[in-house]
Image (cartoon, rainbow, N blue to C red):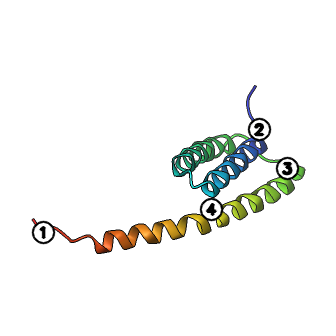
Amino acid sequence: MSQTLIDYYKAIEDSSFKMLKAAQLEDWDEVVRYEGACAVLIEQLRHQSLADQLTPENKTEKARIMQRILRNDAQIRCLTEPWIQQFEQILERKPQLLH
């Protein structure tokens, strides 16, 4: 059975939710895994959207899904940015080797 476009949006939302849960647990390997899953799903969605279109009802559902994905993304960024800042500080303190 082939997936409909809305199924791809739902799968992306599910992966983004799982990514958020992994970030909350500071399980960065899982965050990266779900990020990769999202990337694959987005590419599949792009390919499928060349042949299919959303129904008016699905367009409304897509808007709600996209809002939830964006909220998940914002929360993930809040959780990861302190880690990224700490990593950058570590790199700045490390002496630079000149060759």
User: Viewed as shown, does residue 96 lie left or right of 24?
Assistant: left
**What secondary structure is found at the residue carrying circle 1?**
loop
Task: Please tell me whether mark 2 sits on a helix, a strand or a loop.
Answer: loop
The quarter of the image holding the C terminus is bottom left
**Which amino acid type corresponds to the residue marked 2 in the rendered image?**
Thr
Front of the two marks 3 and 1: 1
Q: Name the residue under label 1.
A: 98
Which mark is drawn over residue 58? 3
Marks 1/4: CA distance? 36 Å
Q: Residue at x 35, y 69 (%)?
A: 90
User: Which comes sooner in the sequence, label 3 or label 4?
Assistant: 3
What's the residue at 46%, 72% (across, down)?
85
Compare residues 11 and 99 and report the one nearer the observer.
99
> Could you tell me the amino acid type at mark 3?
Asn
Task: Say whether disc 1 or disc 4 marks the residue closer to the N-terminus.
Answer: 4
Answer with mark 3 or mark 1, whichever residue precedes in sequence. 3
Q: Where is residue 81 in the image (x, y as percent from the top left)?
A: 53, 69
Q: What residue is disc 4 on?
A: 76
Q: What residue type is labelled 4?
A: Ile
Q: Earlier in the sequence, mark 2 or mark 3?
A: 2
Q: How far apart are marks 3 and 1 (CA)?
A: 57 Å
Q: Distance between the residues labelled 2 and 3?
A: 10 Å
In this picture, residue 3 sits left or right of residue 78: right
- Mark drawn on residue 4: 2
The mark nearer the N terminus, 2 or 1, is 2
- Residues at circles 2 and 4 in contact by the CB criterion of under 8 Å: no
Mark 1 residue type: Leu
